[in-house]
Amino acid sequence: MSTTPSDASRTDADNARFRVGVTLGFSAYFIWGLLTLYWKALKEFDAFELIGWRIVTSAIILVAAMLATRRFFPLLQTLRNTRLVARIGLASVLLTINWTTYVWAVVNKHVLEVALGYFIAPVFTIVVGVFVLREKLSTRQRIAVGFAVSGIAVLTIAYGRVPWIALVIASSWTTYGYLKKQISLPPLESLTAEVLLLFVPAALFVAYTWSGAGSVPTTAGALAIVLVLFTGVITAVPLLMFAGASQRTPLTIIGPMQYVVPTTNFLLGWLLFNEEVTKAKLSGFVLIWICLAVVLFDLFSVQWRAQRPRQQFASSPQ
């Protein structure tokens, strides 16, 4: 049976949407991986104060963008929906927990445990995708999950304790990603609403710490001030990319893509910040890298099979 033009155009649109989602996802995760360097440059300041500045500057940038595109006041009208506001409020709390734990861990020399947390998060995300959203795993994806679980078990044993930093990072990020799929707002509106709900408490905290010993305003040099003020930019850009990716890509795909972040953090913690990597830890990371390789192979093979029939049809004689 021949394919109708409408069916063909719908398939092309779905594939294009999927490719955009994958591109946005990988871009966001690559930026997030490198942000460890950014926060390390601010390690002399309190992590909670830095999060306050991050929220305040993010809110200013996002509101300015919304006003410039004439989308701010329609957003305020949308936020009259109490159920929507409740979901956004929960997402904003989870985002704050994730941010604070991550920044605290980086400035206190726990970059490898941050890496472990973001290695665990994709497995949690896949579990949510399969058991909550009823998404299906391919055979290769199941094999990949097996390698990931094995790697996580090895790493947990190698640490010799419950890796609480990693678990907080993984659980907060996974739940945040799930809630983002339940919020029926475009990426910019969704993120703006989240930081708006956090703005007042964050601004009050910044005001409270303003003149304290060791605070940003009292001790930061010119470069540090610039870095602090730009935390809004480095926050908004990858989060908007992630929001766009989460709306276009199944959790069973976007979950394993997150391994870009912990792999980058692992390399930074090991090679640049000289954190200890034992043979046991290295073997655990290797298992997870195998998981990433299997997932990437599965991802690109699916895309190749989807495009091949159309390529053959296009090149066939008339």
Image (cartoon, grey):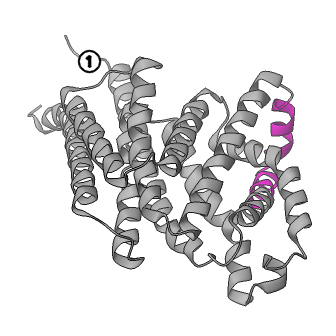
| Residue positioned 68% across, 87% down in the render | 223
Instruction: Locate the N terminus by quadrant.
Output: top left
Q: Is residue 245 above or below residue 203?
A: above
Question: What range of the chain is rendered magenta?
Answer: 61-79
Q: Is residue 37 above or below residue 64?
A: below
Q: Is residue 91 left or right of residue 74?
A: left
Residue 214 vs residue 289, the one in the foreground: 214
Instruction: Locate the C terminus by quadrant.
Output: top left
Q: Is residue 224 visible?
A: yes
* Residue 51 image position (x, y, % from top left): 71, 60
Q: Magenta stretch containing residue 40, yes or no? A: no
Residue under label 1: 3
Q: Is residue 213 left or right of residue 153?
A: right
Most common secondary structure along the magenta stretch: helix
Residue lying at the far front of the rendered structure: 160
* Residue 229 image position (x, y, % from top left): 74, 73
Residue 126 vs residue 236, the one in the foreground: 126
- What's under tag 1, amino acid-wise? Thr
Picture quadrant where residue 285 is located: bottom left
Q: Magenta stretch containing residue 64, yes or no? A: yes
